Image: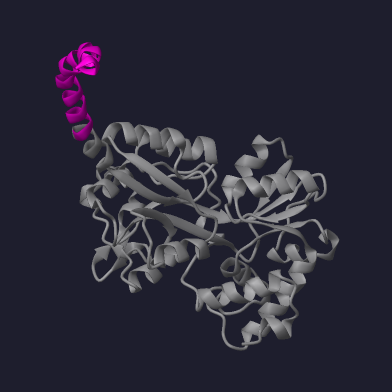
Amino acid sequence: MILYQTLRPALHALRRLMPRIAALALLSAMAAPVWAAAPVLRVLAWPGYADPAVVKSFEQQHGVRVEVTVIDSDSTLWHKISADDAAYDVFAVNAAELQRYIALNLLQTADPARIPNTARQLPRFRNLASIPGLVHQGHAYGIPYTYSEMGLIYDKRQISSPPQSIAALWDPRYRGKVLAYDGGTHNFSLAAQTLKTASPFRLARADWPRAVDRLIDMRRNVLGFYSQPEESVRLFMRHGAALMFANYGMQQVHLLKAAGADIGYAIPREGALTWLDCWTITRRARDPALAHAWIDHLLGDQASALLVKEQGLANTIAESDASHGDNRLLWLEPVEDAELRDRLWQRIRSGDRAAKVLAP
């Protein structure tokens, strides 16, 4: 009894608070599912494709959260999307790679009718059927976003006149002064260009040993390999590179000039490999409508302007001031065996001799 009398005031106070505690608990229970169910768009993008300001405006307009994963090679992109546990909704890929994903049923169609900003694109990008690789069995899978040729960037203080040939990457005058992209697909195409094969994208059986030898020779000229455009700028500036293969094209030119580098940009006489990147939707996309909305947003004024201003890249709604004409552009095509190119390249990069590179 004495204990009860002692605790009675506290018990009365607790009874008075119970309705409020119950109400707060109810509100918490109601709020948790709403927060947990907030839509999340999972995006795979190349560097500079999903500007933070663009992501933020999309999130605000649609009441969602965007998770962006940045990739640095076609090989990395392929392994992420083709993995059994892949968990992405929309990604950017070059048109030459698109058919690989379609063949394995990794994509769903991208409907231009659900992307209003496609009506604002330049005519050559609106006609999807005229662009190799974007349409399969009458259905569109890729929506053009940006493009660039992959030329040669050179330091004007070390190279007085523009390099005329892709073979400059092998020139002994630049030994230890060359920066190369760390990717097998494009490097084998460069080797094929110097060997004057029928196509840089389809090596014949007899071409492989020669191409391997060429890339081993190029490796001896290289001071380093890069994957990301910002990384290439740091290496170029820090080590005083004389020449670089520009896998990211005008994006690297823009970044280097912004960093104060005195550079030039050359399109070799053999032609410059040229990529067209597209947005596409995965088969596992949880909300296809939201994925279409993302693509539409990336074709809008804000994203298109930032692509040019911040990255130096072209968009598909206005003509590019940096165009070098179509006569020396070699638009990428599907290669004969992307996985073989990557496997051999990793061996070459590791310093293996030709016999070991070509071993089974």
Q: Residue furthest right?
A: 173
- 329 or 348, which lies in front? 348
Left or right? Give the position of 191 relative to 113. Answer: right
Color style of the picture? one colour
Spot occupied by residue 331 in the image (x, y as percentages of width and height)? 49, 63
- 224 or 272, which lies in front? 224
Q: Is residue 17 located in the magenta-colored stretch of the structure?
A: yes
**Quadrant location, the C terminus:** bottom right
Q: Quadrant of residue 86?
A: bottom left
Secondary structure mostly seen in the magenta stretch = helix
- 269 or 30, which lies in front? 30
Spot occupied by residue 137 in the image (x, y as percentages of width and height)? 25, 71
Is residue 198 positioned above or below 125 on the image?
below
Left or right? Give the position of 315 relative to 89. Answer: right
> Which region of the structure is painted magenta?
1-29
Q: Is residue 132 located in the magenta-colored stretch of the structure?
A: no
Is residue 256 positioned above or below 287 on the image?
above
Left or right? Give the position of 195 relative to 142. Answer: right
